[in-house]
Image (cartoon, coloured by chain):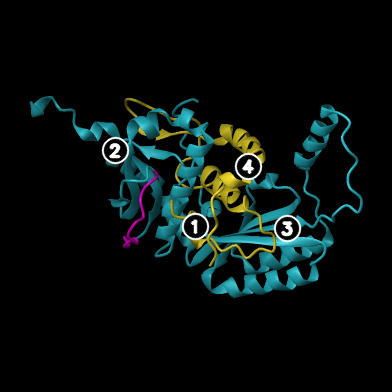
Chain colours: A cyan, B yellow
Amino acid sequence: MASHVKPKANASALYLYGVTQKKVALAAGVVGVDSTTSIEPLECEGLVCWISRVDKGAFADNLASKLENLDWLTETSMRHQQVASAIAEHTEILPARLGTLFLSASSLEADVRKNKRVLEADFARVKDSEEWGVKVFAVTAKPESPPEPMKSGREYLKAKAAMLQRPAVRETDSEVEKFAKALRRIAVRTAAGGQISGAQRGLKWQISLLLKRGDRKKLESLLQKFSEEWAEVRKIEITGPWPPYSFVTRAHAGPRGNG
Amino acid sequence: MPSVASKILLSAEVARDEASLLDIFDHVLNKGVIIHGNLIISLAGVDLIYLGLDAILTSVETALQHMPVRALPTRAKQ
């Protein structure tokens, strides 16, 4: 009774990782966010959309509740990033935000068609470049005497809350400003750092840089110079290279739904 | 799973295990191309599905502050 079998296409959605200008061969073993399906390059409007086919029930219909599950979110985020980085190794990618799903190749194509001009401008912006994250942390001196023992649970919670609180405005000093200026000089562009890692304890300042691949050495030498100068006062952390998440246009889809 | 961070060079003096995951969240949840908006799920007509993630950023952030370090991924170094 094959005619009664539901077509499989109805149960899947296309999960988008990013868009490139050309097709490249990915290393073996790179799989999609569901950890099983392979990554496919789909030609759309002269560009290449990198997708994997995911279960519609798990990834589309129940996305809202899945996102509340931190374990699921962690694994999905890591897999999403892994795919974007695997593609970025070979060519410029405009990485998609987590959870960008389409029900069909034609709807994906329609969306790319609509945003083609913006995408082309983004490709020109990120050409030969990669993203780096830079953070400056305060070095906290160890207290000379052990802290006073807490007298009550209330006191403990108050102290804990104070530790976790992030300052409303990041304090910067002239030294950090000097570092910031030097970074801006070598970068193609800069963007504000992220909201989530901004909660890290001791973080004084952060920025995302779009840097030409050939300028990586300049970044390294700046890092070395300031790390040495700041040894006892501040610490610098650099992550990258990232696909240029912070330097792509976040086109508004318009009020197509409400959430 | 294989470490996602294999391409992420962490040339840091600060060895913070949580750094790579926080940064991954920052990038994949908060940034990225194509669409930015609120919940867009349509069963007919417009068949793009996108869930705006802004609303959950705060809860993720709060959860991470209380998350044990052992739950975080191992970082590969270059």
Badge 3: how crowded within 10 Å, few (<14), some, or many (20+)?
Answer: many
- At label 4, which amino acid type do we have? Pro
Q: Point out the tag, 1 or 2, that comes first from the N-terminus.
A: 2
Check disc 4 and report the residue beneath it.
B68
Dot 4 and dot 2 residues touching (CB under 8 Å): no
Check disc 2 and report the residue beneath it.
A104
- At label 3, which amino acid type do we have? Val
Please tell me whether mark 4 sits on a helix, a strand or a loop: loop
Give the residues in magenta.
Answer: A23-33
Occupied quadrant, residue A4: top left
Q: Position of residue A194 (x, y in %)?
A: 62, 47
Label placed on residue A136: 3
Please tell me whether mark 1 sits on a helix, a strand or a loop: loop
Asked if residue A158 lies left or right of residue A28, the reply is right
Q: Point out the tag, 2 or 3, that comes first from the N-terminus.
A: 2
Asked if residue A94 lies left or right of residue A227, the reply is left
